[in-house]
Structure formats: C-alpha cells, structure tokens
Amino acid sequence: EGRLVVAARVAPLGADHVLLLVEDRSKAARVEEIRRDFLANVSHELKTPVGGISLLAEAIVDAHDDPEAVERFARRISVESTRLTRLVKEIVELSRLQGADVIKDPTLIDVGACAQDAVERSRLLAEEHRIELVTAVEEGCEVWGDAELVTTAVSNLVGNAVAYSENDTRVGVTVRRGRPGLVDVSVTDQGLGIAPDEQERIFERFYRVDSARSRATGGTGLGLAIVKHVADNHGGHVSVWSEQGRGSTFTIELPAANASAPIEPARSAEP
Ligand code: ADP
C-alpha cells in the first residue's frame, strides 16, 4: 500500500564479506507526509479566523464614531475568537490522537455514561432549535479505554446531528451490545443527510460538504476526524448510513470489555 521507502547501509564484515542492512522506512515516511499535510492544512485554517479578526479590529478603528457598528464588529470578533479557540483545541486533540496507535493506560469505562454526558453537552443547543434528544442506553456496556475521549467522540456526533438538522426534529442516541463482542453507540438524525460520494470523505480532517453551513454552525471540519481516531485507537470502527433529505446514522463500534483484555505491556513469566 502506498510508496515503498527503504534506507540501506553497507558495512564491511571481515575480509571477504559485507553486511547489507535494508530498513523499510515506508511507515515513517507516511507518518512524516501526514504530519506535513496536517501542518499545511492547519496554517491555512488558522489564517481565516485570524485574518477576519484583524480586519474587524481595523473596521472598529475606522467606525469609532458609530457605536452601533463598533458593537456589531466587536460581537463578530467574539464569535471568531470562540471558533479560533475551538479550532486550536481540536487541532491539539487530533494531533495527539494521530501520534498514538492505541489508548495509553486504558480504564474500564461505561459507554452509556459517556453517551449521557455527551448528550448533556448538546442539550442547550438542541433546546434552542427545539430538537428533541432521545436516549436509549443498555446497562453494562463497558469497554477498555479513555472515558473523556469516548465522551468527546459521541459529543461530536450529537453536536453534528443537531447542527445539520432542521428545527422541530428528533435526534436519537442509543448504546447497546451490538454484534457479539461489540458495544455500539448510534446517533441518528432526521437532518440534511449526506450524498453517497461524500460519505467516505467526511471523516477526512477539514473536509466539509458545505463550508458555509459548517462555518455558520461554528464547525471546524475536525469533529469526524477526531471521532474516527478515537474509534480506531480503541480498536473500534465508525461508520455512517445516510440518505439525502432523510437523515443520517453514525455508529461507533467498540470491542466490549468482557470480550477483550486491557492492552497491557508484555510481562515476563513469573518464576
Ligand atoms: P464540521 O465541524 O464541519 O461539522 P465534521 O468533521 O464534524 O466537521 O463533519 C464534516 C462534514 O460532514 C460537515 O461539514 C458536514 O458537511 C458533514 N456532516 C457531519 N455530520 C453530519 C450530519 N449528521 N448530517 C449531515 N451532514 C453531516
């Protein structure tokens, strides 16, 4: 898969032998490429709110004798700053997740409790849009992992479900034992839906189907990339089912705790 990158070294070994060391550097090269692309994306994404704030500040200076305009510009500075803060937080979160393959020091977590916390985080926004949040949580759905990360992942899905739905609709969050050995968290909305050819791409960082709508909802384009990394790092998977105009269901599947042991460093056998 991808390019093969090798590093080779030759060292003399005695009078008539040489040692040829060939190292596969493909993974390191791919990681470096991802890091470089990410940095390029990040600087591009940061320029927009920073540029906006600086233009608005100049506009305030020019409009000093028009208090109404000053207030309007100041409010927009505040909105852009909030977005910038969220963007920086998510960039840090994503780069931390990208740098690790698994969760460090996993603990036994109750996915139902994580989902309930996540729903609470979106409650105010949902109420503003008269969107009903309906939860159905099965008891004892435990996995090994990081509770804060799982809560963040579910919260990103619920936040999106609310953001990409019309007023007076319903968002459902269910946690249940899914296929054998798995715990499923599903978030279903009756919103815009996502076209089939966009469904793969939405998990890429900074990818948005409609940038204007994403921006209007304070989106950063990182939410689903974070969800995907959280699922992957827990040994799980995220998928989407969607139909345009009908809605979407995002499902995170995680290995159930009773079916898997925590990932522990290898220990030598006791004498
Ligand atoms: P954003 O911050 O833009 O919401 P995400 O990574 O969370 O970024 O999502 C990427 C894109 O996927 C969004 O911009 C939106 O176009 C689309 N999307 C995500 N969730 C939904 C949903 N529940 N319904 C419709 N479109 C969605």
Image (spheres, rainbow, N blue to C red):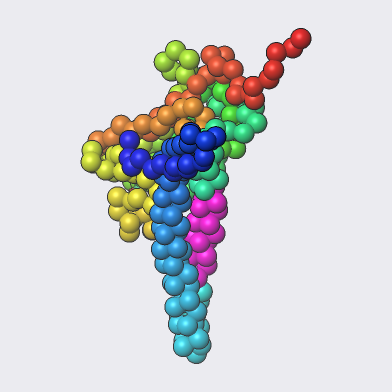
Magenta segment, prevailing SS (helix, strand or loop)? helix
Q: How many marks?
A: 0
- Could you say where residue 136 lies in the image, as x and y percent from the top left? 48, 24
Quadrant in the picture for residue 195: top left
Q: Is residue 14 visible?
A: yes
Q: Is residue 236 left or right of residue 89?
A: left
User: Looking at the image, which residue is at 48% across and 48% down?
Assistant: 125
Q: Is residue 115 above or below residue 39?
A: above
User: Which segment did they paint magenta?
Assistant: 77-93
Quadrant in the picture for residue 248: top left
Question: Considering the image in quadrants, where does the C terminus appear?
Answer: top right
- Could you say where residue 188 lies in the image, as x and y percent from the top left? 38, 33
User: Looking at the image, which residue is at 32% across and 40% down?
Assistant: 2
- Could you say where residue 120 lies in the image, as x and y percent from the top left? 55, 39
- Could you say where residue 21 lies in the image, as x and y percent from the top left? 47, 37
Question: Considering the image in quadrants, where does the N terminus appear?
Answer: top left
Q: Is residue 2 left or right of residue 145?
A: left
Residue 91 lies within the magenta run: yes
Q: Nearer the viewer, residue 259 or 13?
A: 13
Q: Is residue 174 above or below residue 124?
A: above
Residue 35 lies within the magenta run: no
Q: Nearer the viewer, residue 10 or 117?
A: 10
Q: Is residue 131 visible?
A: no
User: Looking at the image, which residue is at 40% across and 32% down?
Assistant: 238
Q: Is residue 252 above or below residue 100?
A: above
